[in-house]
Amino acid sequence: MSYKIKWGIISTGHISGKFATALALLPEAELLAVASRDRKTASQFAAKYNIPKAYASYAELADDPDVDVVYIGTPHTFHLENSLMCMRKGKAVLCEKAFAINGAEAREMVRVAREENVFLMEAMITRHVPLIKKVQGWISEGRIGEVRMVKASRCARGEFKHGARQLNPELGGGSLLDVGIYVISFASMIFGKSPVEAVGLSHIGDWGSDEQGVAILKYDKGEMADLSFALRTAASNEAYILGTDGYIKVHDVFAVPTKASLFIDRKEVEVIEEPIIGNALNYEAEEVMRCLKLGLKESPLMPLDESIQIMEIMDQIRKPWGLVYSNDKIIKS
């Protein structure tokens, strides 16, 4: 592979624009192509972000022999279809969270990645920012003793028009897949294992999607995670990691964290601050390119089997809610 790793972007939505901006900060990255289902939209996006190639179909981008890796920023319901198409053309894939709609789709994506021997990673920004690595250092050094609980909230108050992707169940909209995945993935990262029990409650709004919810996860040694998530409720977005000897507070953890505090005997004894470069999506791209240069097929920071486990946890949590997505019954391979 040449020094410049050539990227393609599928979708021209808001998150794709942020990713294009992030790539511009990385000298080893070259944003070569963008694809939309509409040629005019693709051309406008390409002009805005100085992208040489604009395609009017996702398949055209997947067929481009010069593209090394594809960022997929489409709605959740299309992640399986778009990822499989790119991987079967030999492309590495960075797929936006939520990784898929359900555990079955996630398993299929990972199966194809391994069958095709290509790189695949879920885009979970929290795994890659510098602050989190220092927080994990506190934990591994035993600063708070044995971790017993995680408390985390990812809530926002949004005003959405009817049919908006965020609350459209036909597109996998709702608080669980859109923001709940952040807190569930955070707990998974801290405990490093799957829970033995996972339960939750939600409020299903007038549009048929979950507007807010809570989840409790219990692990094999009695550890627990207390998690909340919402798209129509304003709240702080903090996380607490509670141990036998102290606790850690991560401030604004899901708004790209830059500050964490260590408490011993209820007193703040240390504070770390790590400023963010860019919009932080560049850290995800850097990790992808690091793995590609090393010949890795998955990232140790966001392992594929863990992405599957997280989707399965969310399947389990939403089952009692009667929340069913359009993709739940059919795996499109």
Image (spheres, rainbow, N blue to C red):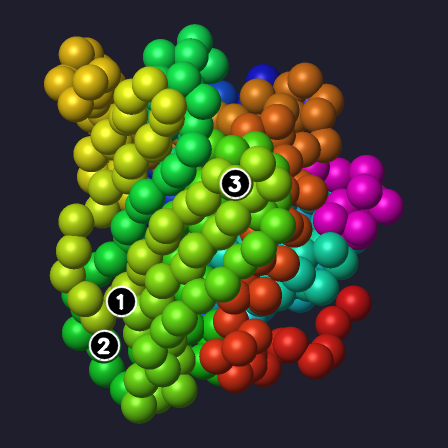
- At x 67%, y 33%, the residue is 298
Dot 2: element: loop
Viewer-proximal residue, 150 or 308? 150
Identify the residue position indicated by label 3 in the image.
Answer: 222
Establish if 257 lies above or below 326.
above
- At x 57%, y 36%, the residue is 221
Identify the residue position indicated by label 1 in the image.
Answer: 231
Q: How many tags in the picture? A: 3
Q: Quadrant of the C terminus?
A: bottom right
> CB of mark 2 within 8 Å of CB of mark 1?
yes
Q: Is residue 116 left or right of residue 185?
A: right
Q: Amino acid at mark 2?
A: Phe
Q: Is residue 289 left or right of residue 44?
A: right
Dot 1: element: loop
Q: Nearer the viewer, mark 2 or mark 3?
A: 3
Residue 261: x %, y % from top left: 20, 22
- Of labels 1 and 3, earlier in sequence is 3
The part of the chain drawn in magenta is 110-122
Q: Amino acid at mark 3?
A: Gly
Q: Amino acid at mark 1?
A: Leu
Q: Does 112 lie within the magenta span?
A: yes
